[in-house]
């Protein structure tokens, strides 16, 4: 069982890399952003609850997000391991994840951060917004708000995982294949 948390600012490439890593290591990929967008598209109660926050670039409340994530893990109990993408994003979520995995005798094996400069990332997101249809990708103010949310609520998680000796960082600038290689080099040593 290996459980990896993919960490990084909005636009850092977590989703792109997760597509390769889940195949290579036979992991269940859980992207909270994708799950929220699926629910919004299908107009479920969860989707309606999350929409206002997401469209503004705010985080969805912890209670909603944690419950959703736990339900997704519980749907995949025969998994060989999980790749968490976009979760945890707050200390409360990180604590909840540790406690929840512990009830199954599992734990977070490692957190790997994709690092990149903010200005490059904002450009990438605006480019993605031209085709993604994501409201939160199209307005620079909303994108900046996501970075504020990240700096305030998510960046502290780096220390949380460093204190547990579980934090790794890789350079997120380069070709998709190069970055997959860098991530794989970390995973292969776990
Ligand atoms: N763990 C989470 N906690 C709270 N909100 C979340 C979480 N994951 C995703 N969201 C919501 O979904 C939005 C999109 O998430 P994601 O697709 O991971 O985007 P990004 O490109 O910003 O990394 C976030 O801005 C936030 O509103």
Image: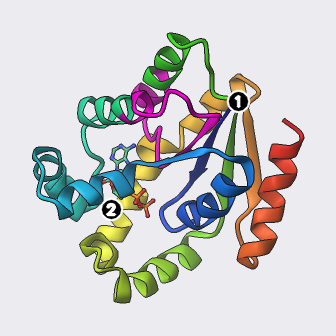
At 63% across and 44% down in the image, what residue appears?
27
Which residue occupies the foreground of this view, 86 or 19?
A: 19
Badge 2 element? helix
Residue at the spot of label 2: 145
Residue at the spot of label 1: 109
Q: Report if residue 93 lies within the magenta region.
A: yes
In the image: residue 19, left or right of residue 35: right
Is the Cβ of the residue at disc 2 closer than 8 Å to that at disc 1? no
Q: Answer with mark 2 or mark 1, whichever residue precedes in sequence.
A: 1
Query: Which quarter of the figure is the N terminus placed in?
Result: top right
Q: Point out residue 59 in the picture as x, y percentages from the top left corner.
A: 30, 48
Residue 42 marker:
none
Which residue occupies the foreground of this view, 165 or 73?
A: 73
At 73% across and 48% down in the image, what residue appears?
25
Q: For residue 120, what is the image quadrant?
A: bottom right
Mark 2, mark 1: which one is toward the viewer?
A: 1
Q: In this view, does 9 lie above or below 108?
A: below
At 60% across and 28% down in the image, what residue appears?
160
Q: Give the residues drawn in magenta, as a range.
A: 72-95
Q: Is residue 136 above or below residue 92?
A: below
Q: Point out residue 35 in the picture as x, y percentages from the top left corner.
A: 33, 52
Query: Which quarter of the figure is the C terminus placed in?
Result: top right
Q: Point out residue 36 in the picture as x, y percentages from the top left corner.
A: 28, 53
Disc 2 from disc 1: Cα separation: 30 Å
Q: Report if residue 46 lies within the magenta region.
A: no
Badge 1 element? loop
């Amino acid at each position: 069982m290996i459980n990896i948390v993919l960490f990084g600012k909005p636009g850092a490439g977590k989703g792109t890399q997760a597509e390769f890593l889940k195949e290579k290591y036979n992991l269940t990929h859980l992207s909270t952003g994708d799950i929220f967008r699926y629910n919004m598209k299908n107009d479920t109660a969860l989707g309606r609850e999350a929409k206002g926050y997401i469209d503004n670039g705010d985080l969805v409340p912890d209670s909603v997000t944690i419950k959703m994530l736990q339900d997704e893990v519980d749907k995949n109990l025969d998994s060989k391991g999980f790749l968490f993408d976009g979760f945890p994003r707050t200390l409360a979520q990180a604590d909840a994840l540790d406690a929840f995995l512990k009830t199954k005798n599992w734990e977070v094996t490692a957190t790997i951060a994709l690092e990149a400069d903010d200005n490059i990332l904002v450009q990438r997101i605006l480019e993605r917004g031209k085709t993604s249809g994501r409201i939160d990708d199209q307005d620079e103010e909303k994108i900046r708000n996501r970075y504020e949310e990240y700096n305030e609520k998510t960046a502290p998680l780096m220390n949380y995982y460093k204190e547990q000796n579980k934090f790794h960082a890789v350079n997120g600038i380069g070709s998709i294949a190069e970055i997959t290689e860098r991530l794989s080099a970390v995973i292969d040593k776990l």
